[in-house]
Image: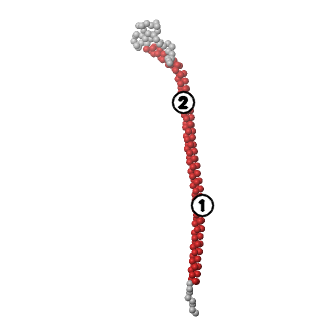
Amino acid sequence: MSVPGPASPVGALTRPPDSLEAGEPTPGLSDTSPDEGLIEDLTVEDKAVEQLAEGLLSHYLPDLQRSKQALQELTQNQVVLLDTLEQEISKFKECHSMLDINALFAEAKHYHAKLVNIRKEMLMLHEKTSKLKKRALKLQQKRQKEELEREQQREKEFEREKQLTARPAKRT
């Protein structure tokens, strides 16, 4: 692929003219002292520099302006892409945190079920202990009553034996 070179400015020599032969002096160059005609050469050179600069600018400036515009568009698109990427990252983080929250809710549900079971067990144990306490109280009362009855029975038997024992008769 070949790249076209810059167009040569008007009036600039790209090769020596065909009319000049070897040994002939080129126009603008003299075989006299280098200081002669320096001011005139400078004005021509300034003019040539101006023309070259204008030609260079007119040739490259539109491309540079298009490139600048394209770079600005690319930069703007990049900013938009970065913003979009940041939004997607935040959405991803939210989704990830939602998964964490869902896991926490599942764990909370599991522990809630455990607490409900523990509560049921505690209520059942409370009922059993209450029944056992009532039964123990009834048994204790029954034992005390039986013991009291035995004690009374012993006393009656003791009294009976006392009455049945022979007593010496009183002499009167």
View extreme (bottom): residue: 172
Q: Report the amino acid beneath label 1.
A: Glu
> Does residue 51 show up?
no
Q: Report the amino acid beneath label 2.
A: Thr
Closer to the camera in the image, 54 or 125: 125
Q: Position of residue 169 (x, y in %)?
A: 57, 89
Q: Going 59% across and 53% down the picture, which residue do you hit? A: 116
Q: Going 56% across and 28% down the picture, which residue do you hit? A: 73
Q: Going 57% across and 39% down the picture, which residue do you hit? A: 91
Judged by depth in the image, the label closer to the viewer, 1 or 2, is: 1
Q: Going 57% across and 55% down the picture, which residue do you hit? A: 118
Closer to the camera in the image, 39 or 3: 3
Distance from disc 1 to disc 2, alpha carbons, whole Å, reads 77 Å
Q: Position of residue 102 (x, y in %)?
A: 57, 45
> Is residue 135 placed above or below 60 in the rendered structure?
below
Residue where numbered disc 1 is placed: 127
